[in-house]
Image: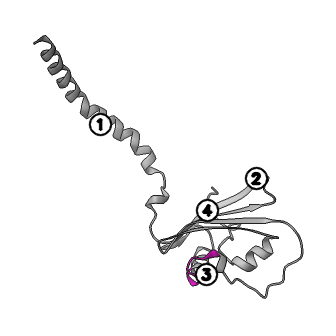
Amino acid sequence: MTYFLTCLRSAKAVRRALPAAAALLLAAGAAPAQAVSRDGLSGNWLQLTVTRGDARSSDTRGTLLLCDPPQGHSRAAEACDVLTQADGDVGALHGDSGRVCALVYAPVTVRAQGEWNGRPVDYQHTFSNDCEREALTGAVFALDDQEVPEV
């Protein structure tokens, strides 16, 4: 009988403590919920990065390009239009094929990861220089003139 009463008292104590514990867990979980989660993004979006130099370089810039409505860098509307014409296929961008670029080797690696029309996008390419990158991808990776914080 003593064991039963002890268990009954323990159960009551646990029931009284549950609301406080639940409130504590909710408060602790609130901070991460404020962070932007890529799982919560809808529409067409790409995480864009541009790295100048070789693989050892630390000169990497990036931004999240959202296309519903266009935002992410100063040429987001133009980038979204170009991507829409290519159905989100970064490798199929036409760019300015008539542009002439100097034969200077200053490698620029670009990467786009995200979702376009419900399909995953994962593109990476190293161009010989910024001129070639701009000529072939247009505004998509034009992150230098952005006014948003880098990632």
Residues at circles 1 and 3 in contact by the CB criterion of under 8 Å: no
Residue carrying label 1: 22
Nearer the observer, 148 or 122 = 122
Mark 4, Cα crowd under 10 Å, few <14 / some 14-19 / many 20+, is many
Residue 27 position, x and y percent, is: 37, 39
Q: Residue furthest right?
A: 103
Amino acid type at circle 3 is Val
Mark carried by residue 63:
4
- Determine whether 111 is above or below 4 in the image: below
Tell me which label, 3 or 4, sits earlier in the chain. 4
* Residue displayed at 76% across by 52% down: 58
Residue 5 position, x and y percent, is: 13, 16
Dividing the image into 4 quarters, which one contains the N terminus?
top left
Write the start and end of the magenta stretch as one range.
84-90
Location of residue 16 (image quadrant): top left
Residue carrying label 3: 82
Mark 3, Cα crowd under 10 Å, few <14 / some 14-19 / many 20+, is many
Separation of marks 1 and 4 at Cα, in angstroms: 36 Å
Instruction: Answer left or right for 116 relative to 82.
Output: left
